[in-house]
Structure formats: structure tokens, C-alpha cells
Amino acid sequence: MKSRYDAVVVGSGPNGLAAAITLAQAGRSVVVYEAQATIGGGARSTELTLPGFLHDTCSAVHPLAIDSPFFRTLPLRRYGLEWIHSPAALAHPMDEEPAVILHSSLETTAGGLGSDRDAYLRLFQPLVEKWEEIQHDALGPPRWPKHPVTLARFGMRALWPAARQADMVFRTARARALFAGICAHSAVPLEWMATSAIGLVLTLAAHAHGWPIPRGGARAISDALAAHLKSLGGEIVASASVKTLAQLPPSQAVLFDLTPRQILAIAGLRLTSGYREQLSAFRHGPGVFKLDWALKGPIPWKDSACASAATVHLGDSLPEIAHSERACWKNTVVEKPFVLLAQPSLFDSTRAPEGRHTAWAYCHVPNGSEADCADLIENQIERYAPGFRDLVLARSEMNSRRLEQGNANLAGGDISGGANMLSQIFFRPTFSHYTTSDPGLYICSSSTPPGGGVHGLCGYFAARKALEVI
């Protein structure tokens, strides 16, 4: 290692690696410190259940990664990153009707919504046609838009509460359930302002480039980013937990791919009291309870169309989903939680031994909850796939506390880097976004705009800000 660097990055999640790559591309010397033995943060994969069964420890399906304006500029395929697209992006089974399917094709999706076909097209077609412009202006820090008319059209829809918008735009339970499930990725009550934003972005991403999975697991994304960083001269030090700034080599800038509470613990003495108060006020959202399974065979869905998608949402209706998402904020867990499930081995043979399968699912729970939701989640799966439990060879259970123990960025099990409340969508973690009260310290985690998801944009924008002075 060098005795001095232009920049040090703490944390090797996709945002930390993106920040380091951006700095290295500009000719700066950079080293990344990672607390765990393996890099990747939330984009890692390992054998959680049985030998030969590969599971993603956090993120599994990556609509924002394949579509990331930053990742698209990098030669990640050269380093082994290969995207796999299931025939459908998303399946949403229902109790009394055929499953609702989100296809890459806008027309095909709309055609499956019956009398809501035209309403779906009216909502999404103008936005799909302008997706590149929306990405440029909406996925980043608040700034003067390059396409103000397009951004205004998107913003008028994005600011609506998801439940209200679903009720106003759609007439059928099918369309409302589909929209509610996608918006529930926001992990805030669907009656809150701006909960439509994440639903709109994820749906537009599906129609633009799909919801793919990386061959070999989420770690393939991190491995490709790390390989490219090293090709640029960047360095990575694993198994190096940073507790104080004194542990780091001298540098002009330190970029933290960490949550505000971790930054306060490491660098609080370098920050002004006013800025420390702002960081302390940053609010985290619900946690998750996560299950991974090694299975004898594929999930036996009642509706076979569910086997066409790597992602499945389990929650019969808008009211049921909304009830589940409200409960997290009231420190309760409902009997029928909204479940987000991934079944990657249907489309990626590297995930399990021949003839066997893996699956992954979680539901939202109160932040820091130690509640055991395994039976609740499996009951929801059995509801739409009777006989599922008979296929289970082994399972891995992780409540919110265990998730945080494995990755300190998952504060209380929050996988979004902070609550997606209206104020924290635009100003996270503070009004200054990536900069701090110390000119040599920056934040590049998903606690900054544009927030959660594997896209690297938080790291990219933070690094661009740091390059203004180093």
C-alpha cells in the first residue's frame, strides 16, 4: 500500500466502488476499506443453507443496475457480469383471478389488465417514451433539470400517495394490486406523499430494460466493479473494520459508503455540532425479516404464469398490501404480510445443484425487530403455492438484528439507507447531500440521493463533488 492517497473510501458496496472508480478514472489514487472479509456490501452472495446452494445476502433482482446511467459507461461485461432476463419482470398472484404479470412490453402488460388497459397506457406510455430524460433529472441530487417539462410531468405523478393514485387511475383490483406492490418497495405507508415515486421508477425500468438477475448472484456485480477499479490502479483492503479516522492513511478526502450513525461514530469529532445534530435526526425506515431456502424443486405455483418471473409479489389486494406496510410504522407485524420473493435458480443454473432450486423472500417489519416471521412468510407462499413447505431442504432465517450484524449499513434491518419519506427523498441525509461540515469528508452511501438500490449513482455523484477540490 501507498503511504498516502488522494482519496480513501470506507465501505465496498456498489456505491463505494462506484465512488472509487469515478476517482480513479480522474487519475486520483484511491483505496477502499471493507469491514467484511468479502466485498460488496448489500450485493454479495454465499452459501447460506447447504453446500452448492448460492444465495444473495441482500439484493437479488437489479432493475436499477442494468439501467444505471453510470454502470452503463463501464466495461463490466469484460469482467464477467452477465444479465439474465426472466420471460416476465414480475408476477403478482391473486386469490380469485389469474396472476397479474409485469412484462417488459408496455402493451403486453396493459393487455393483461382488462378494463384498465387504457388507463395503464395513459399513465406509463408518455413516461416510458421519456425515460432517459427522467433518469437524467430524477435519479440524482436536486439540481436544475435538463428536461424541465418531462421532469414536471413525472413529478406530478411521483408526488402522489401510491394508494390514492391507484384508486384514482385504476378501476380494477388487478391493476391496483400490481401498482401497490411495486410502490411498496418504498417501505413506507402507501398513504404517504411521494410513495408513487419508487413505483413509477421501478415500473419504467421494467419497460425499459427489465428486472434482471446477474448470473452467479449479486456478487457478480461487485466482483466486476472491483476488477475494473483494480484495472484503474485502485486498491481494496478487506477485513479492515474502520472505527476511527486515525486508522486510515493520509488523504485529501475520505468518502463514507456508510449510514449517518456510523459516520458519527467514526468521524463525529471532525464535524460541527450543528451538522452532527442534522445527521442524528436522519430517520431509518422499517427493517426486513429475510428467508432463504434450498429447495428440492421449483415452487409449485397454483398459477403457472408465476414461474415466468424471477420476482413475485405476494399480497392479494391494495388494501391488504397497504395494511401490511402501515403496520411496520406502528411497531406491529400483520398476519398476512406483503412478501417480496425471488426465484433466481429458475433462470440461472449456477445457483443450485442440478434439479434443485433456491428462493429468497422478505417482508417489512419494525426497525430493529427481532420478531420471527418465518411462518407468516411461508403461509403467504403456501397460499399461492400449496405444497411449498414439502420442498424445503434447508432454510436460513435473518431478522433485522441479524441483518445489521452481517452488514452495519443495514441499520435496524433498513435496506434502503434511510426512510423514503418525502423530505428524505430530496434531502438525504442533510440539505448538503454528499458534503459534510468538514471539507475533507464526504458521504457516498444510499443515505444520499438518489437513495436505495444497486445503481452506483450515490457514489458517482459524491465522487464528482469530491473531485471539485482534490
Image (cartoon, helix red, strand yellow):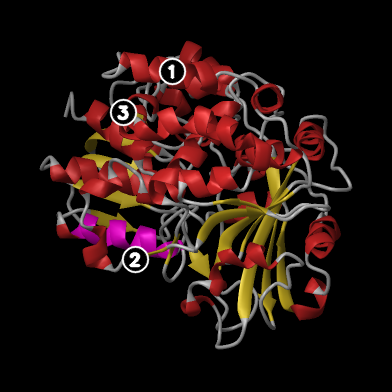
Residue 266 belongs to magenta span: no
Element class at badge 3 = helix
Q: Is residue 46 above or below residue 119?
A: below
Judged left or right of residue 363, residue 110 is: left
- The label shown at residue 133 is 3
Identify the residue position indicated by label 2 in the image. Answer: 82
Element class at badge 1 = helix
- Tell which residue pokes out farthest to the right in this image: 335
- The label shown at residue 360 is none
Earlier along the polypeptide chain: callout 1 or callout 2?
2
Task: Report x, y in % for residue 135.
Answer: 35, 32
Amino acid of disc 3: Glu
Identify the residue position indicated by label 1 in the image. Answer: 153
Q: Which residues are magenta?
A: 218-230
Gap between marks 1 and 2 measured at Cα: 34 Å
Judged left or right of residue 122, residue 376 is: right
Amino acid of disc 1: Arg
Q: Quadrant of residue 228?
A: bottom left
Amino acid of disc 2: Glu
Judged left or right of residue 253, residue 318 is: right
Disc 1 vs disc 2: which is toward the camera?
A: 1
